[in-house]
Image: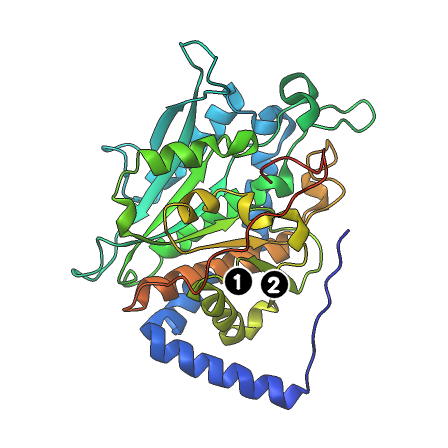
Amino acid sequence: MIGFVRLRGPAAAIAVVCAIACALVQAACGDAAGPDYVAAAASITAGDMRGWIAALSHDSMRGRWTPSPELDKAAATIAARFQQLRLEPPFNGDFVQIYPVIEADTQPPPYPEAPNVAAIVRGSDAALRGEYVLLVAHMDHVGTWATGGTRCTPVGADSLCNGADDNASGTAAIIEIAEALTLLKVAPRRSIMLLLTSGEEHGMHGASYFVANPPVPISQIVAAVSLDMISRNSPDTITGIGLPYTTLGSAMQAQALAHPELGLEVVGDLWPGSNLFYRSDHIRFANVGVPSLFFFSGPTLETHTAANTVDLVDADKAARVARLAFYLACAVAEEPARPQWLRAPDPPVARAPGDGAPAM
């Protein structure tokens, strides 16, 4: 298990910083730090997060391989929840986008197909509701030894990689954030789009297809925030991968300070040699100019193994991280100005052969 170093200052200084942060957030983001948002965020509970993670990573889901009937079942379940919440379907009246899974240029048609799922919470401001804050998580995992091969590492006789942390945790967060958004008395000024991709473990096929075939103009997506593996390791920290690259980094830190009840400190990339900014779905949006950020709780020994099960998940941490992502999305949606790039991402470094898959 990866540990984090928590920096602690005098209690009085921390209180002053939090007070200043709260004032700045209120000034910059209107009601995004107000009681209506706090009440909505409270609907994201550890129990609900654990329930979704357990359902998505159950043995019956067979590791949600792309493509598979179990992945289709996960997509249908999420789409049904979005419909139940009366969200707006972005794909010509549908919540599901089907794309061809092309593993190599030499693969002949017909190609197998796989789903993405998305929904929109329409913004309240007539001038800004045509712009979108995107929250994204991948709902697929690496299947079983029989389907995923070397991507899935058996543990003893167990050859099914459940993918509880990776990435039922991020998927559960998106579902719970969707519900929280519907509880707001007034929606944020910008629209918020919720996207669950598949094919991430293959090389981000779903995200690539979405970017090439978006339901709204990419130029109108003002930010992309991915949640991938958010339920493990130190309970009081969350890593912001890409923290210094855009103004989303300071916004994420401001929201954590403005909501000390979350008990989360935002830290920067502790694994700079692992090219993490390039290894989850947000990178497909960053590649086309969308300011992007990645919520990540760190690697574990169980990643991509049959031991990645719900009993190891810290559901309370996952819920608090989801609330932080909710506050960040709402703050960005309320802010008059769009997020901006501050500098180009650090280029990827050469990695040793066999050093993990291209995605998390």
Residue plotted at (43% across, 37% down): 207
**Left or right of 37 on screen, residue 163:** right
The circle on residue 268 is 2
Image location of residue 226, percent across then percent down: 48, 49
Which quadrant of the figure contains the C terminus?
A: top right
Residue 142 drawn above or below residue 102 = below
The circle on residue 310 is none
**Left or right of 323 on screen, residue 86:** left
Count the labels in the image.
Answer: 2
Q: In this orientation, does residue 95 appear?
A: no
Residue plotted at (26% across, 51% down): 220
Label whose residue precedes the other's in the sequence (1 or 2):
1
State the CA–CA distance, disc 1 to disc 2: 6 Å
Q: Residues within 10 Å of mark 1 (few under 14, many from 20)?
A: many
Amino acid type of the residue that numbered disc 1 sits on in the rendered structure: Leu
Image quadrant assignment for residue 118: top left
Q: Give the farthest residue toward the right.
A: 156
Residue position for label 1: 243
Q: Residues within 10 Å of mark 2 (few under 14, many from 20)?
A: some
Query: For this rendering, which residue is in front, 309 or 46?
Result: 309
Image location of residue 219, percent across then percent down: 27, 49
Image location of residue 339, percent across then percent down: 36, 63
Residue plotted at (44% across, 62% down): 246
Query: Could you tell me which secondary element the residue under label 1 belongs to?
Result: loop
Do the numbered discs 1 and 2 sit on residues whose CB atoms are within 8 Å?
A: yes
Query: For this rendering, which residue is in front, 294 or 45?
Result: 294
Q: In this orientation, does residue 306 appear?
A: yes
Q: Give the farthest residue toward the left.
A: 126
Image location of residue 231, percent across then percent down: 63, 51
Residue 58 drawn above or below residue 88 = above
